[in-house]
Amino acid sequence: MHEIDLDELLTRALPPDGPYSPSRLKAAASAMRDLTEYLNNATLPGNIAESAGYPGAVHDILVRLYELTERLPQLLEQLRVVAVDHWVDNPALRTTAGGESARTLACNVSSALMLAQESLPSLARTLRAASASSGSLYLAEDV
């Protein structure tokens, strides 16, 4: 059976340099969610020995999670800028929520994204430390 190169497949489906559209952005965010679910399932106690039971496999996962946390601040900042620059003072912005203005809700989005962005460096440092430590581990075959 020929194994599919998932990195190549993803790059073809969602090339980093575009094209971009609301549906592609939603697909990319959905892929992040679904890939996290895949990792969650793959690392369940009944699956871990087969999928990531070796230190090298765990190390590879930790390195990529660290890389993700290094890239997320840019995404969150860019989304925050959209909320502020394109929504806050846009007279066409409306809301379906009663009680608060659309402008207030846009400001809430911006504030929440800023808080999320500020929490990521700590997570990145922790994942970097875990990946650095895991990179030196292996299971001896002669035991």
Image: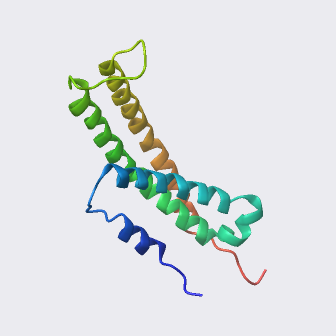
Rendered residue at 39%/52% (across/down): 70
Q: Specify the quadrant of the image occupied by residue 107.
A: top left
Q: Position of residue 114 (x, y in %)?
A: 36, 33
User: Residue 137 lies in what quarter of the image?
Assistant: bottom right
- Residue situated furthest bottom in the rendering: 1
Closer to us: 44 or 106: 106
Q: How is the image coloured?
A: rainbow
Count of all numbered marks drawn on residues in the image: 0
| Residue at left offset 60%, top offset 59% | 39
Q: Is residue 9 left or right of residue 43?
A: left
Residue that protrudes farthest toward the top in the picture = 99
Q: Quadrant of the N terminus?
A: bottom right
- The x, y position of residue 45, in whole percent, is 76, 59
Residue 90 versus residue 7 in the image, above or below: above
Q: Measuring from the top left, give residue 95's x and y in whole percent.
A: 36, 23
- Which quadrant of the rendered structure holds the C terminus? bottom right
**Residue positioned 30% across, 52% down in the render:** 21
Indicate the position of residue 59 as horizontal and vertical percent values.
Answer: 56, 65
Image quadrant of residue 134?
bottom right
